[in-house]
Amino acid sequence: QVQLMESGGGWVQAGGSLMLSCAASGIIFRVNTMGWYRQAPGMQRELVADITRGAVTNYADSVKGRFTISRDNVKNMVYLQMNSLKPEDTAVYYCAADVKITLTTTARSYWGQGTQVTVSS
């Protein structure tokens, strides 16, 4: 019903930048909060940043001042600009979104497949 597709991952040297994009598609009435999570090998998935439909943002302390989340409500897309990348940012990054598929249904969370980000020292 709803699909999230991430793009933009890859390999970068420490200090470099990458931009992730995520598009929500399918049967969508409204996309509420969208966010980015990451999971490093052997670690739990953690919130990186999220953004409400009204553009209120929230960041993990580890990325504040380096990452910027933004969204396009018309295109149902969310972006993550990552600057000053560190080796500890290496992880699979997942897009998530709370989506209402009709006016009367409750919003539920959907996840993308993930995109690998690798930062070398």
Image (cartoon, helix red, strand yellow):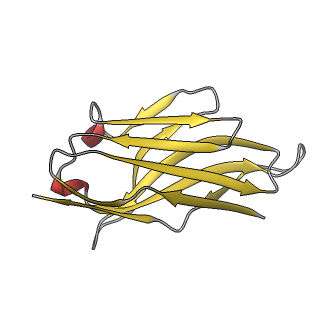
Q: Is residue 33 left or right of residue 70?
A: right
Quadrant including the C terminus: bottom left
Residue 103 position within the rendered picture, expressed as x and y whole percent measured from the top left: 89, 43
| Residue depicted at x 51% and y 46% | 35
Question: Measured along the vertical axis of the image, is residue 102 above or below residue 73?
Answer: below
Q: Position of residue 117 (x, y in %)?
A: 32, 61
Q: Residue at x 52, y 58 (%)?
A: 6
Q: Is residue 116 above or below residue 65?
A: below
Q: Position of residue 105 (x, y in %)?
A: 85, 50
Quarter residue 37 falls in: bottom left
Q: Position of residue 118 (x, y in %)?
A: 26, 62
Q: Is 40 placed above or below 49 here?
A: below
From this viewpoint, which residue is outermost toward the left?
Answer: 121
Q: Residue at x 44, y 34 (%)?
A: 58
In the figure, is residue 13 to the left or right of 74? left
Total numbered badges shown on the rendered structure: 0
In the rendered image, which quarter contains the N terminus?
Answer: bottom right
Q: Nearer the viewer, residue 95 or 79?
A: 79
Most foreground residue, 79 or 54: 79
